[in-house]
Image: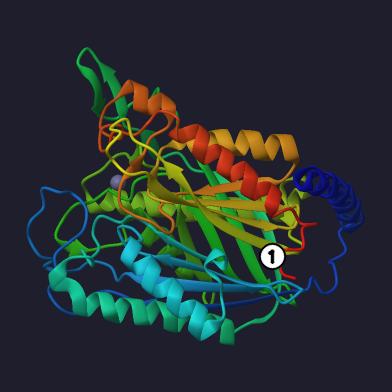
Amino acid sequence: MKTMQAIRRCFWVTIWGLATLALADDGQPSASTGWQAGVATAKITPDEPMYMAGYAARKEQAEGTEQDLFAKALAIEDDRGHRAVLLTMDLIGVSDALRSVVADRVRTQHGIEPASLLMNASHTHCGPAYTRDDAREYFDWLSSTLVDIVGQAIADLQPARLSYSHARCGFAMNRRTPTERGYRNHPNPEGPVDHSVPVLSVSDADGQRRAVVFGYACHTTTMGFLRWLGDYAGYAQEYFEQDHPGVTAMFVAGCGADQNPYPRRELKYAQYHGRALATAVEAALEIGQTTPRHQHPLQGPLHAVMETVDLSFTDPDRPDHAYPVQVWRFGDGLTLVALGNEVVVDYSLRLKEELGHARGTAVWVAGYSNAYPGYIPSRRVLLEGGYEADSRPWDPDLEERIVAKVHELFQRACPAANLHD
Ligand SMILES: [Zn+2]
C-alpha cells in the first residue's frame, strides 16, 4: 500500500518536474538551484615499496611511479540540507575492510550516513595491493586520508549548479569469445558493450565549472607493468584537468567486468584511450550546452538509499552473500545506481532500459562500488560459463535479485519520498 502511494506521488512529481523543466528551457539560466558542492583531492601514490594489485600472476613489488594515483571527494548538499559524498579512487577496488573503516569514520566525524557515501574504485591494475597484511601501514594512512578529504570537500561546500549529459567512447571491447571449448577471455568485437560516457558537471553559482564526474564501463587494464599508473582512467582525469585548470576530474568505473580496453600492453595505448575518454567528456559537455534535449539541469532533492541483497549459491552449505546496492536520485533528472564488486555489462544495459526509458530519468550504473572483490555475472554470463562466471557457484537467480533490489530502492528514493524526517 505504501509502495502504491509512493508510486502515485512519484508520478505527480514527475509531471511537475517536466513542467518545471519546460519553463527553464527558454535558455534563461535558472536562479539559485539550491545545490551546494565542494571538492577535495589527495595523492595516494605509495611512498614505500609495495606489492601491486590485480593480475594474480604478478608477484613483484612496484619499481616506481609512471603516474601518481589520486583519491577525490565531491560533497553535494541539496536545498533541504541533505549531504552526500562521492569518493573516487585510483585503486583496484573498495575492499570490505576499507569501506567499513571509512564509512564508520565518515559517519561519526562528518555526519554522513553510509547510504550517502558512495566509494568507487577505478580498478586500475597498477595500484597498491593495500589489503595485504604487510600493507597495514598504508591501509591506515589511506583510510585516514579518505576521511580527511571527505571533510575537506564538506568544508568547501558553496552554491553550485549540477547538470548531466552523456556522449560515447569506443575503446572498450567485450572480452568473452565463444569457442568449441567454452567461453575464452579474448577480445570479441561482436559481444555486448556499453560505450556510454555519463558526465555530471558541477559549476559554481556563476556557471564557472568546478568539477566533472564521468564514467566508463571497461577494465582499467591497458597496462600490467611494475609501475604505479591510473591507466586510461588516470590519463583521462589528468588530461581533462590539464585542459581545464582548476577543474577536478573524477572517474567512476562502470559495469566493465567483461570489457577490456583494446589495443593493450603499451603505455601509449593507455594514453590514447585516456585522451579518447577525456575528449568524450568534452563532447558530452558541448552537447549538453547546445542541445537542450541532451542536457539535464539537475534539481533536488537528492535521495540516497543503500541496502544489501542476499545472493545464494548452488552449494547449499555455503552461506548467502550480502551484496550492497546503492541508489542516488537527483530529483527526476538523474538516477545513479552503484553496484558492488565486478559487474558485467548486462546490468547497466538492462537497468538503463528498465529505469531510464520507462521512467524518463537519466540512469548511470556504476560497478566497483563499496565492495570488492568478486565477479557478479548476469544470468546469461553465468549460464554461458567462462572467466567472469566461474569465480563462485552463484545461483542463477542473482541477476533477478539484484535488479529487483535496484527497482525497490529506486521507488524508495522517489523525489517525493520524505526520507529525512
Ligand atoms: Zn577485474
Q: Residue at x 30, y 58 (%)?
A: 92
Element marked by disc 1: strand
Q: Is residue 85 above or below residue 363?
A: below
Front one among 95 and 25:
95
Extreme-top residue of the structure:
180
Extreme-front residue of the structure:
317
Residue 260, picture quadrant:
top left
Q: Residue at x 30, y 56 (%)?
A: 124
Q: Is residue 37 above or below residue 377?
A: below
Front one among 6 and 387:
6
> Where's residue 200, x and y in %?
61, 59
Q: Is residue 1 above or below residue 301?
A: above
Does residue 418 appear left or right of residue 410 in this picture?
Answer: right
- Label 1 near ligand 1 (CB < 8 Å): no
Quadrant in the picture for the C terminus: bottom right
Quadrant in the picture for the N terminus: top right
Q: Residue at x 10, y 65 (%)?
A: 61
Amino acid residing under circle 1? Leu
Residue density around tag 1, few if under 14, some if 14–19, many if 20 or more, within 10 Å: many
Question: Residue 346, can we see it?
Answer: no
Residue 404, picture quadrant:
top right
Question: Residue 106, can we see it?
Answer: yes
> Where's residue 401, x and y in %?
51, 37
> Where's residue 58, x and y in %?
11, 52
Q: Is residue 56 above or below residue 204?
A: above
| Residue located beneath label 1 in the image | 162
Front one among 53 and 28:
53
In this rendering, the count of numbered labels is 1
